[in-house]
Image: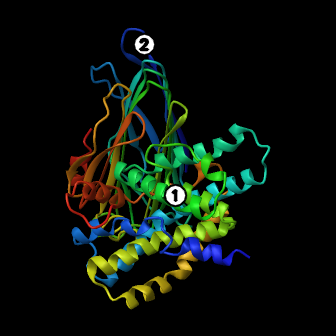
């Protein structure tokens, strides 16, 4: 299945945000869910199981100057193997203009047994843009060993690299759940906060397997591993 | 042709200060995640799969830039410095832990000092200036170029160094049998060769396309380790 979803958010000139474009296609359906705040909130509703092997799903997001957009999903997505062993792909590209803000806060990605999933996100922030970006990866459904999944995130700020990280899990990578990488944790994730107005902060230890770290640039990253999705969310609740 | 130079730079006795770093092993031992040889083997496989591709690719890419620079003395200043600056910024964006950024730069600074004195060259001066020093893979790439080594040799030394640091730390931290640790390294030699070859093969790519593998516990435990008042290793 191939699908493209697009969201374009613009300032409405009255302090709020208008969705100039909101277009999904199965299995990526989008719903505007107004909550009374000046920020526009969109929920991603998966209308089919998956992503399944062979799926090629793309989401394009554009946040204009002074606009604020929050994207959530109604449920975790579960990467599943296809019949022919083809990989599944989810590609998200986002641009945020100066004074704009994007919050990308979807539910977890679960890497089910036998999956071959590649999630790739590319975010370009203009100088003065703000971002919340959360990624949560769960290694298999209940009592299940995961397949192979790669979650890659590249964020540029003001024309330069701010964050590049690619997390690979699964049996195809020696040592992936060992003491140098996940230490047997079934859940891992990060929350990137980019705020050009925030004062620099020192690193903070949030728990035995969770820390908040200042990046080189106007941003902090919380990185955590946890025994399950619930404990992980406790560290990454935005 | 440069076999002795290659051995000299790869040697653990090369005075680059690497012995002061356990590459996360000290924190993993303290957390009870590595307690024996089997645990060390899992740890080293993780380092080889996650840290080594990034370190070796940035070393190889720096080496290739340095080797091209060295062979083109008429290059303008921007031609010379831009590739290194871009490599530095891309590696910085891949190193999310401030403790690991500092450890990399301090090791880079120590290596640069040793390299400058061992194989004098104008190349070192072209690395981007930073108060804590250049990132270790950039310093290694330039030093390997100054020593006349190939890109493949530079990548090999980088990948090998990712394994030997924690392996020798394990002997001190866990009292493991040094013969068994050497046997483990010998068993991982083929995997290490493959990682090094893959890194050399991507050295020509633009810095942003180089590997960006992240190991969550490497970052998390480096920050925990940095808060300790007493520790045997700097990282």
> At which x and y percent is residue B86?
59, 43
* The quarter of the displayed image where residue A215 is located: top left
Q: Which mark is residue A12?
A: 2
Q: On the rendered structure, is A218 left or right of B151?
A: left
Is residue B139 shown left or right of residue A182? Answer: right
Mark 2 crowdedness (10 Å alpha carbons): few <14, some 14-19, many ≥20: some
The chain that hosts pointer 1 is B
Relative to A133, residue B228 above or below: below
- Give me the residue at 57% from left, 57% from top: B58
Can residue A173 be seen in the rendering of this structure?
A: no
- Residue receiving disc 1: B113
What residue is at 54 percent from the left and 60 percent from the top? A87
| Position in image of residue B187 (x %, y %) | 49, 86
User: Element at badge 2?
Assistant: loop
Q: Which mark is in front, 2 or 1?
A: 1
Residue B203 is situated, as x and y percent measured from the top left of the image, at 65, 58
Residue A110 image point, x, y percent: 36, 57
The residue at 73%/53% (across/down) is: B70
Instruction: Give the residue displayed 33% in from the left and 81% down from the top.
Output: B171
In this view, the residue in front, A156 or A13, is: A156
| Quarter occupied by residue B177 | bottom left
Tell me the subunit letter for badge 2.
A
Farthest front residue?
B117
The answer to whether residue B172 is above or below residue B115 is: below
Split into 4 quadrants, where in the image is the C terminus of chain A?
Answer: top left
Is there a contact, CB below 8 Å, between mark 2 and mark 1?
Answer: no
| Apparent side of residue A121 relative to residue B87 in the rendered image (left or right) | left
Which of the two residues, B66 or A81, is positioned nearer the viewer here? B66
Residues at marks 2 and 1 on the same chain: no
* Residue A117 visible in this rendered orientation of the protein: yes
């Amino acid at each position: 299945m191939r699908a493209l979803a697009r969201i374009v958010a613009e300032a409405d000139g009255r302090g709020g945000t208008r969705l100039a474009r909101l277009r999904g296609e199965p299995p990526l359906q989008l719903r505007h869910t107004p909550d009374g705040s000046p920020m526009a909130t969109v929920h991603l509703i998966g209308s089919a199981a998956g992503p399944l092997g062979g799926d090629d799903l793309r989401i394009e997001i554009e946040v204009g100057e002074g606009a604020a957009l929050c994207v959530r999903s109604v449920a975790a997505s579960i990467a599943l193997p296809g019949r022919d062993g083809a990989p599944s792909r989810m590609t998200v590209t986002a641009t945020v203009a100066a004074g704009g803000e994007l919050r990308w806060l979807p539910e977890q990605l679960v890497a089910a047994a036998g999956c071959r999933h590649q999630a790739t996100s590319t975010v370009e922030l203009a100088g003065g843009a703000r971002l919340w970006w959360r990624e949560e990866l769960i290694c298999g459904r209940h009592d299940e060993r995961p397949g192979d999944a790669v979650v890659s995130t590249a964020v540029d700020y003001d024309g330069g690299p701010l964050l590049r990280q690619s997390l690979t899990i699964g049996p195809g990578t020696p040592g992936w759940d060992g003491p140098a990488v996940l230490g047997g944790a079934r859940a891992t994730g990060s929350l990137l906060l980019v705020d050009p107005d925030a004062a620099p902060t020192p690193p903070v230890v949030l728990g035995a397997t969770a820390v908040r770290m200042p990046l080189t640039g106007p941003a902090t990253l919380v990185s955590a591993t946890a025994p399950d999705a619930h404990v992980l969310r406790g560290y990454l609740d935005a | 042709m440069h076999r002795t130079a290659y051995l000299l730079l790869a040697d653990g006795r090369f005075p680059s200060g690497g012995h002061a770093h356990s590459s996360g092993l000290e924190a993993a031992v303290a957390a009870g995640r590595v307690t024996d040889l089997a645990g060390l083997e899992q740890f080293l496989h993780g380092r080889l799969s996650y840290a080594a591709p990034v370190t070796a690719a940035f070393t190889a890419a720096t080496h290739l830039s340095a080797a091209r620079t060295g062979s083109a003395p008429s290059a303008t200043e921007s031609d010379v410095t831009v590739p290194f600056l871009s490599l530095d910024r891309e590696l910085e964006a891949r190193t999310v832990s401030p403790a690991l950024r500092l450890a990399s730069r301090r090791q880079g600074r120590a290596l640069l000092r040793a390299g400058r004195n061992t194989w004098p060259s104008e190349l070192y001066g072209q690395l981007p200036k930073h108060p804590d020093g250049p990132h270790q893979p950039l310093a290694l790439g330039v030093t390997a170029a100054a020593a006349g080594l190939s890109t493949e040799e530079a990548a090999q030394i980088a990948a090998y160094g990712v394994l030997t640091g924690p392996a020798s730390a394990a002997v001190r931290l866990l009292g493991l049998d040094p013969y068994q640790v050497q046997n483990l390294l010998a068993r991982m030699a083929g995997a290490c060769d493959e990682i090094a070859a893959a890194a050399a093969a991507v050295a020509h790519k633009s810095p942003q396309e180089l590997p960006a593998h992240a190991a969550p516990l490497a970052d998390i435990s480096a920050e925990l380790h940095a808060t300790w008042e007493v520790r045997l290793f700097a990282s």
